[in-house]
């Protein structure tokens, strides 16, 4: 076969392969090994949006700049003249339900108490995006109420984000858990994915 014939054959084959790859729809499987593994078929845009939303909301909760109550006038006031943290979060916060906005305010109000228990290794962050009593020997009704209230507010936020993104609330929580664990203080027990065992294991941050 002549050299120019071989070259032409290779060009045609390469072009056909590129057209096949470009025109074929592929499901993207998102896997994240740190601090845990997300093993779901999830649209990459939903995953990215969830990470962005989680960062925005958690930054808002951690900043202390968030007003204690939400309403339209406070939102407009803050967006135009108020704290940068709240203004930057307007893109997602403005789309959240009033119930979710109240949940964010609740979480900010209890954050200091929650962090103090996490630093002591008493309350941990699991792989589903919820807090849990890690050291059960220290359990008390007051502590249980704190955990239940925090998880109830997180559930409200996850459900709302799932509705906005057209996703499963459980998978929203799993992705969200990454951001929460990254923001958790040193000493916090966190549930992370172990590649060797293929299971989630607890470790102290």
Image: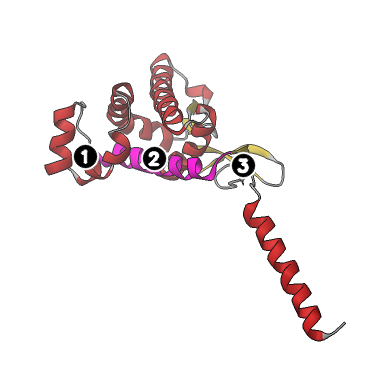
Give percent across and percent down for residue 12: 73, 69
Question: What residue sits right under mark 1 in the picture?
Answer: 65
The circle on residue 53 is: 2
Which residue is depicted at the point 58% across and 46% down?
32
Magenta segment includes 14: no
The residue nearer to you, when weighing 82 against 203, is 82
Whole-number angstrom distance, CA of label 2 to CA of label 1:
17 Å
**Who comes first in sequence, dot 2 or dot 3?**
2
Indicate the quadrant where residue 73 lies: top left
Hey, which residue is sitting farthest top in the picture? Answer: 141
Give percent across and percent down for residue 17: 71, 62
Whole-number angstrom distance, CA of label 2 to CA of label 3:
23 Å
Asked if the residue at tag 1 contacts the one at tag 2, i.e. Cβ–Cβ closer than 8 Å, the answer is no
Give percent across and percent down for residue 111: 32, 32
Question: What residue sits right under mark 3 in the picture?
Answer: 193
In the displayed structure image, the side of residue 24 where residue 82 appears, left or right: left
């Amino acid at each position: 076969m002549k050299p120019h014939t071989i070259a032409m054959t290779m060009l045609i084959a390469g072009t056909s392969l590129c057209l096949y790859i470009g025109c074929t729809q592929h499901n993207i499987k998102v896997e994240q090994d740190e601090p845990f593994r997300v093993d779901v078929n999830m649209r990459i845009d939903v995953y990215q949006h969830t990470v962005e939303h989680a960062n925005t909301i958690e930054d808002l909760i951690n900043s202390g700049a968030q007003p204690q109550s939400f309403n339209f006038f406070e939102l407009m006031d803050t967006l135009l003249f108020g704290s940068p943290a709240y203004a930057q979060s307007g893109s997602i916060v403005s789309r959240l339900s009033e119930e979710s906005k109240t949940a964010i305010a609740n979480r900010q109000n209890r954050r200091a108490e929650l962090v103090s228990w996490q630093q002591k290794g008493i309350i941990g962050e699991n792989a589903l995006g919820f807090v849990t009593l890690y050291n059960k020997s220290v359990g008390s009704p007051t502590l249980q109420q704190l955990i239940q209230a925090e998880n109830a507010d997180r559930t409200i936020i996850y459900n709302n984000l799932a509705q906005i993104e057209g996703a499963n609330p459980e998978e929203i929580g799993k992705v969200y858990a990454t951001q929460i664990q990254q923001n958790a203080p040193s000493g916090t027990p966190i549930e992370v994915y172990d590649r060797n065992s293929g299971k989630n294991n607890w470790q102290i941050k």
